[in-house]
Each structure stands twice: as structure tokens, then as C-alpha cells.
Amino acid sequence: MENLTNQQKGSLMAFIAVMFITPDSLFIRLSSLETWGLVFYRGAIPFIVVLFGMLIIYRLNFFKLLIGNSFYGVSYILTFSITNITFVLSIQNTNVANTLVMIALAPMLSAIFGKIFLKEKTDRNTLIAIVITFISVLYIFYDSLKIGNIVGDILGFVTAAGLAAGATIIRAGKEINLVPSAVVGKLVVALVALLFIDSFELKDNDIFIIPTMCILCVAIPFVLVTIAPRYITGAEVNLFFLLETILGPVWVWLVIKEQPSLETIQGGVVIILTIAVHSFLAIKKTQLKSN
């Protein structure tokens, strides 16, 4: 890692994180646990695992790091907690593809937040991409409104906004290690779930599915995603979530045959292509400037 540039470090972390995340939606679908039970374990298990790791690495300095996160830490805990909760609620209230297409909006939302809060310049290509993706989302929303999935889609959009906000916060405080705040965010998720949970019992395959999901698809990725924006922009980190948008529904379709609607496929293709083209042009522009 020491021989890598900041761009390479951030991109590698984001890529590995998203590859771990891709089967997450499938695990949620395979679980028979009720929604708030899922939210609880997705908060509690990663909290214990990552806290244990942080205490081994940093010992009591962990708490100094947490206090040192200050305003950025509190803000990140809030956005991180909301995002973790709304993701599960969205998956449970609409098609997996719909949720992941909404999450694909995170890079564009990151660009908007970067412009508003970090005073980063928004070029013409970005503005065009934002308009196209916004229209595509309205198209998907309209379809979901007809079949009664609108609540799940809205929660998916909130998840995307939370991811974008979190990446912006990390970018703004890039000199700060916000992993301790993310750990606290997981604790907050578990505590909120306690207010609504009906049962803690894990039955049958859930005994294996829940711990596997919480460690591989939640604990490891959230550490990497929290660190990556210290090296690359929030928009660049969230671009890697396009892989989840593509691969997530494929896992679900292959295993449990859940098919997205034609409107979701059409809108999703437009969103993914728009962001992919925008990213290619942005990278090309950056390379020309460096030369």
C-alpha cells in the first residue's frame, strides 16, 4: 500500500468494499428474520467485531480518536446510522433492483453536496448528468407508485443521499480517522432497532446467514468505505457502488429469481450509462490537465 498513490489507495479500498457488499441484498432476501431483527444484528455484530479490532490496534487511543472526531464525527454518526437503517427498510419494501438503482444516484448527489458544502466546482457535464439521472429516477418512482413500491424507492433514495452526505463529511474532515464514529453509528443502529424488534431468535439458516452477512457484507466494507474518501473524492468512492447496482440484482435473480420491472431496468440502464460516461469524461479531463 505504501507504494500506491492516494488515487490508487482510495480506489482499491472502494473496489474491495463494494465487491464484499454485492451479495448483501441476497443475504437479506434469504434471511427469514423480521426487518428490525435484521437491522439490530446488522448494527450489533459489526459494532462488536470492529470495536474489538479497533481496541486491539489503538487500545485506549480509540476513545481519544472518537472524541477528536468532534463535529465531523457527530455528523457522520447521524448520516451513517440513517443510511444503515433505510437500506434494509428499502430492500424489504421494494425490489432489490429498485433499491440499488436509487443507490446508484450517490455519485451525483455527492457532486451536488460537494458543490454546496465544499465549494467544489460543478462543470456542465455534471449538471447534464444530474438532470438525466433525476428524470430517470422520476420515471422509476412513477412505476413504483403504480404498483405500490414507492415507500421502498423513497427509502432507497434516502440511502443514496446518506451515502453521499457521509462521503462529503469524510472528505471535509479527511485528516480525521472517522472509523471510530462509524463504530458508534453501528451501535446507534442497534439501539434504534431495539425500540421496534419483536424477536432476537435466529432459526434454521439464519444462524449462518446473519453472522456471515454482518461480517463480510457489513463490517469489512464499512471500514474500507469510511477510509477511502480520505484519498479520493466522495463522488469517486460512490461510483464504485455502480458495481453493486449491476451485480446485486444478478445475485438475487440467479438464486431466488426476483426480476425487476421493465421500467426499473430502463431507468437503471440510463442512470448507469449516464454516470459511467460522466466518470469517463471526468477522468479524461483530469488526465489532460495533469499532462
Image (cartoon, rainbow, N blue to C red):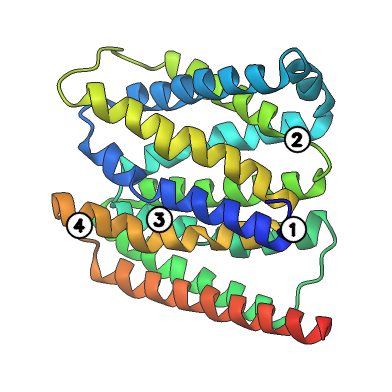
Q: Give coordinates of residue 119: x percent, y percent.
A: 85, 61
Q: Is residue 115 above or below residue 216?
A: below
Secondary structure category for the residue under label 3: helix
First of labels 3, 2 by sequence position: 3
Contact check, label 3 and label 1, Cβ < 8 Å: no
Residue at point 30%, 38% (across, down): 28
> What kind of element bears circle 4?
helix
Mark 1 or mark 2: name the one nearer the start of the chain: 1
What residue is rendered at 27% in x and 25% in y? 34
For residue 100, the mark is 3
Residue 159 visible within the image: yes
Identify the element where label 1 is drawn: helix
- Residue tagged 2: 177
Of badges 4 and 2, the one in the foreground is: 2
- Whichever of labels 4 and 2 marks the residue nearer the N terminus, that label is 2
* Residue wearing tag 1: 6
Residue under pointer 4:
253
Q: Amino acid at mark 2?
A: Asn
Q: Nearer the viewer, mark 1 or mark 2?
A: 1
Picture coordinates of residue 215, whole percent (x, y) = 42, 31
For discs 3 and 4, the disc positioned in front in the rendered view:
4
